Image (cartoon, coloured by chain):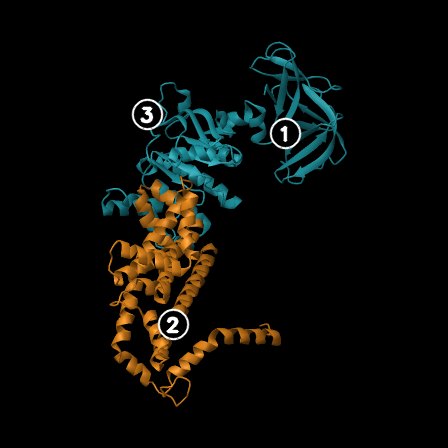
Chain colours: A cyan, B orange
Amino acid sequence: MSETVFAPWEDPNEKPLIRFQNVTKRFGDFVAIDDLTLDIYAQEFFALLGPSGCGKTTMMRMLAGFETVSDGRIELSGQDIGRVPPNKRAVNMMFQSYALFPHLSVWENIAFGLKRGSMPKEQIAARVDEMLKLTRLEKFAQRKPHQISGGQRQRVALARSLAKAPKLLLLDEPLGALDKKLRQDTQFELMDIQETTGTTFVIVTHDQEEAMTVASRVAVMDEGRIIQVATPAQIYEAPNSVYVADFIGDVNILTGTVKSAGDERYHVDWAVNQPPVLATSAKPFSDGQECHLAIRPEKILISPTKPEDAENAVQGKILDIAYLGNLSTYHVELPGGQIIKAQTANTRRISRRNFTWEDPVWISWSATAGVLLDQ
Amino acid sequence: MKRLSWFNVTSLTLGFAFLYLPMVLLIIYSFNASKLVTVWAGFSTKWYGTLFQNEAFLDAAWVTLKVAVISSTFATVLGTMAAYVLVRSGRFWGRTLFSGMIYAPLVMPEVITGLSLLLLFISIGLDRGVMTIVLAHTTFSMCFVSVVVSSRLISFDRSLEEAALDLGCSAFDAFRLVTLPIIAPAVISGWLLAFTLSLDDLVIASFVSGPSSTTLPIKIWSAVRLGVSPEINALSTIMIGIVTVGVITASLVSKRNSLRMQREEQAAERPA
């Protein structure tokens, strides 16, 4: 059984659906998007992730046609769409506030876009019913937006933006207004709908968990630039910079200088009174170069005695314990004052409390656990 | 229920007496049998009868109504357009000047507005009549409409218009199909305000009206100068009645709507 993995971005012959070419957007003196180049492929679920003000919303609004490009060009299926107004683009958007028309019923909201074209009446009705079924809203067709709940409103917004079968659907923080439980359910629903319809989705979010869950690829942005574009797993396991490592999930950063130990292995001298730690990196580093070693807390083991076979082990004492139910995070203070986070899964129901505050413990990790970064 | 203290009762009584005593007096004297306004001679409705026989008053009322309906409609269209441009188009060359100029008539003394309009009509050779009153009323009431509508547009969620554009509307369709229905209550209150202002206006109308076209306020004013007649009391009572019914109906309707909206929103959030 050989199943091809969906990864059009690795195929050099694949034509991208959207192509940003050296796009710059300025608002007066402020540069919102800075010389950005990016390809997004058909049927992708692409996430733009970053803190507020990083330019992700501006990118989306340029795709929708609400903002014009200052420099560079944006192509949709090979066509420059820089001068195409929003109502002439095969792109639809789901707004953060949902932007449902309050004076129209759910049915009329979904039919709104279809009625703008030359589609015959029966076809419009059939399409609206199809959308209502897809989003499980049949019962609410005749209600007004204020007569349904927040979760239902979100689904109406989705149905309305999908009704015209756009080439590209833009979702601006689509789940921001829902509470956590509903948000998680809706994430999977979104993925199902994306798969069923085969539409290309571009989602803007500041919630890294959401981006990781739904997206086929994630672009991490900061100050108008894309820092890294990769699959969620690559972003998490192989971030290309301290910024990305720190933005996605929790991370320990050890800063120091490298010394080659041969065979893609390096010693990192990171503290005055500690032995250097061992790390591997496919990317070459020169001796004496400054580096940052990023290690995820769950890749650090915590034990009462020094583990015999560990490649890296440091002693410290427990400063804080955060119990999250499924996980516990220990903050371990090293003799130099540095704090390292180590995470363990609470696999047993009533865990034997091995460690408590002020306990001296050993933390250890393998040479391959961390990522060596130069910036 | 909190009980009212004697202080509150006194201020309430004084306030209401100050506001409504003159009108109450006017209503009472409209039912006076005597021709002398200040002498009570028993209850009668005869002045209402003679009022409806008085051609001059009826003509003036008809002119006033016509002028009010036409001018407030024009003012609403123009005022809404101006408000839309001012709120929506952000910065353009001369925006501050434009927005300042649109609100200037609000503070301009009516005498000056009336005089300048009169000069304009004379210089372009327009005969004074219903047409000139309509033009004058449109001019001064459109800025009031513009204030009412723009305050609604400022709180209007812009993404609704963007959604309409995104779904294939032209800018005009987005306004017609989405913006206008949503801001309709503000547009209607703008229209009502313009209508009331036009009904009320004495100063500007007296500058620009011709001999053939007298509005009711002018008619009343000139009649009163010859002496207050009980007919005028009757006419004023009718006007007070119409306004009262209008205001009470409007507030009842809006209160009922907002209550229903609240109930439905609560019902929607409750799990089925």
Residue under numbered circle 2 = B245
The x and y percentages for residue B24 are: 44, 79
Locate residue A155: give its quadrant: top left
Who is closer to the viewer here, A23 or A277?
A: A23
**Residue B222: % across, % down:** 34, 73
- Give the spatial CA distance, label 2 vs label 1: 72 Å
Query: Badge 1 is on which residue?
Result: A297
- At which x and y percent is residue B161? 37, 45
Name the kind of residue labelled 1 in the image: Pro
* Residue corresponding to mark 3: A78
Relative to B56, B111 lies left or right = right
Tell me which chain the residue with mark 2 is part of: B
**Viewer-closest of B30 and A220:** B30
Amino acid type, mark 3: Gly
- In the image, residue A83 sits, relative to residue A183, either above or below, namely above
On residue B152, the disc is none
